[in-house]
Structure formats: structure tokens, C-alpha cells
Image (tube, rainbow, N blue to C red):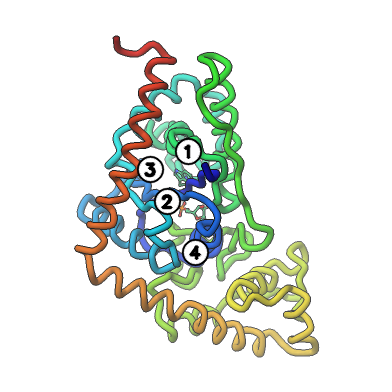
Amino acid sequence: MKDLVFSGVQPTSDIHLGNYIGALKQWTAIQNNHRCLFCIVDLHAITVPQEPKELRENILDAAAAYLAAGIDPKRSTIFVQSEVPEHAELGWILGTVTKMGELERMTQFKDKSGKGGAERASAGLFTYPALMAADILLYDTSAVPVGEDQMQHLELTRVIARRFNERFGNTFQVPAALIQKHGARIMSLQDPSKKMSKSDPSELSKILLSDDADTIRKKIMRAVTDTEGGVSYDPDRKPAIANLMTIFHHATGKTMKDIEGEFEGKGYGDFKKALAEALIEHMAPVTKSYHEYRDNPNALHKLLDAGRETAQALATEKMKLVRQRVGLGR
Ligand code: AMP
Ligand code: TRP
């Protein structure tokens, strides 16, 4: 059997360029030679408060975004996490082999618990990595394509898999993370020291999959640059321009060297203009097909129904083994 690839995005607000480059674009390339499951992780989304009506809309938005990015439902399975209850069940079980100290070290928990701190964060936000481990281990996943911010969760998933296997006998495949060289961490257009993030209140900080050409142009032209001039790739000294070059690289396929050559002796203004047009050209078909898929919810429901069937069959099998190994039930 082909190696299985699993990944997911939370259905919380709009998908942005960081998600697209860091995750979705990578997924579409992988589906050509791997069996793939792409999940819409709604149980993870509710670890911070969600408006129920919006959550349901966001689930369909995510499905449309997966398709628009190029996920081919004939080759890959797209499904909703909560519709396969084994995810929650295995998440609970894995929570019992995960240590509090391990969860306390997760930077995403520290970031997301925010000002209120651990005292006010939900217990679900704390145990989030055990559920993520369940998503991955339930399908004997060998590789998980994600952005760099998920590396720590992936490491913990590997620890949990090994610990479970040692305690209960070999049950889970230990998965590897797949992280790209360029684009694993797209930064905010307004502050290159922060990652581009759904939760950033600044509209100018992120480009959304649903943005039209004028909006993309405006956001790129207003992006911050570095005090030191010149279009050259040096993430430490010139983080803002390195970020814009990474986006340019993904929009055009050009290498950093090509880009440096093309803009030698030119200013940031020229570079930004070229970047805006290249990005608009690259994103226009994606945005157009996003709206087409999104305007046909019946087709999305059908697709998610089929995806659930496929995922459910695999999950049912695996959980029988897990319950037996742990000694649950009779
Ligand atoms: P999330 O929005 O947290 O559900 O993330 C979904 C996927 O997008 C994960 O694989 C993340 O690692 C990836 N991702 C999120 N933000 C970025 C970013 N700024 N740059 C690159 N990848 C990202
Ligand atoms: N935690 C991931 C994020 O916020 C989303 C996610 C949940 C995920 N389960 C997963 C990603 C399993 C990869 C595999 O981006």
C-alpha cells in the first residue's frame, strides 16, 4: 500500500496565504504519489469559542478552499473530523498516555491562551495535541505536511506513538513531519517578526483566499519593508523582504537567485508592483474556483459524505485494535 499522508486545517475564519503556501499547496503536490486524507478539524476549532452558525459555514469554506487549491477528491479523501467519532475517542485514550508537563511546554497553548493565561483557557485547548495525535495515528499515517508552527505538535505525536507502542505493543506507525524549505512560515505583511495568522486583527497583515485583485494589490503595496534597501534574500537582516521574496517564489516558481537577479539595482517599489501582479495572477484561478465551489453547497455536502465513509471504514478497523490493546470493554 502507498504511504498514507494526513493533514488538516481548522475551520476558523478565512484561509490565508500562510495556510495556502504552508499547507494546501504542499498537499496538492503530494496527492500525485500518496494516498491522502485531508481533514477539516472542527473539534480543534472549538478549543476556543466559536459561533455555532459560523462554524458550520466555515466548514464548507474550508472544503471549498481545499478543492480550489487543487485537492482532487478522486485521489484524496476530504472529510470532517467530528463526523468520525473515533477521533475524539482516540484523543481521550492518548490523553491518558500524554504527560501534563509535555502539554505545558507547547508554545501554541501558551500563545493561544493569551492574556487570560492557563487559568482561563479551556481544558480542550490544553489537551489539543493529544487530539491532533489521534487524528494522525488513527490512520497509520507516515507523513504529515504542515507549516513550521506545527512541528512541536508533530514531535509530541511521535513521542506519544512510541510510548503507546512500548506500553501496549506495536500499534501505531510513527509519522514524520513534512516541512518545506521556503514557505513553511509566511510572516505577517505588517510585522515580519510575527507569523501570518488568522487571529491577527489587522486586515493588512494577511492575504485571504477570498481577496480580489484590488485588495491583494493594496495589501502588498502597503506591506512593511526593511530599512536596509535592495532585493536580496537574507531572512536575519532583512526579514520583511525575505518574506515577500518567499511569496514571490511561490507565485512564480522562480528561485531566490532568479529574483535577486531580476531586481538588481531596483527599489522596493518596483519589486512590490511586480509581486502584486504575480500574486494576483497566481491566486486569481484559485479564488475564482473557491467561489464556484462555495456557491454549490450541495456538491460540497456530497463530497464530505463520501469522505466520511472512507475515513470511517479505516477508523473503525483501527479502533477495534486499540480498544483490545488497551483492554477496554469486553
Ligand atoms: P491553522 O490555520 O492553524 O489551522 O493552520 C493550518 C495549516 O496552515 C497548518 O499546517 C499550519 O502549519 C499552516 N500555517 C498556518 N499559518 C501559517 C503561516 N503563517 N505560514 C505557513 N504555514 C502556516
Ligand atoms: N493543529 C493544526 C493547526 O492548527 C491542525 C491539525 C489538527 C492538524 N489535526 C491535525 C494538522 C493533524 C495536521 C495533522 O494547524
Ligand 2 within 8 angstroms of badge 1 C-beta: yes
Give yes or no for contact between labels 1 and 3 (Cβ–Cβ under 8 Å).
no
Secondary structure found at label 2: strand
Residue type, mark 1 in image: Ile
Residue 52 in the image: above or below residue 238: above
Judging from the image, what secondary structure is the residue with disc 3 in? helix
Check disc 1: other Cα within 10 Å, few if <14, some if 14-19, many if 20+.
Answer: many
Q: CA separation, marks 2 and 4?
A: 14 Å
Earlier-in-chain disc, 2 versus 4: 4
**CA distance for labels 1 and 3:** 13 Å
Closer-to-camera residue (57/191): 57
Is the C-beta separation of discs 2 and 4 under 8 Å? no
Report helix, strand or loop for mark 1: helix
Question: Looking at this view, is 247 or 124 the one in front?
Answer: 247
Q: Is residue 226 above or below residue 76?
A: below
Q: Residue at 50% across / 57% down in the picture?
A: 31
| Residue assigned mark 2 | 38
Q: Earlier in the sequence, mark 1 or mark 2?
A: 2
Query: Which residue, given by chain and number where applicable, does mark 4 sit on?
Result: 20
Query: Where is residue 18 drawn, in percent x and y?
Result: 52, 63
> Which x, y percent locates residue 227?
73, 75
Circle 3 residues within 10 Å: few <14, some 14–19, many ≥20: many
Q: Which residue is mark 3?
A: 44
Ligand 2 near label 3 (Cβ, under 8 Å)?
Answer: yes
- Residue receiving disc 1: 136
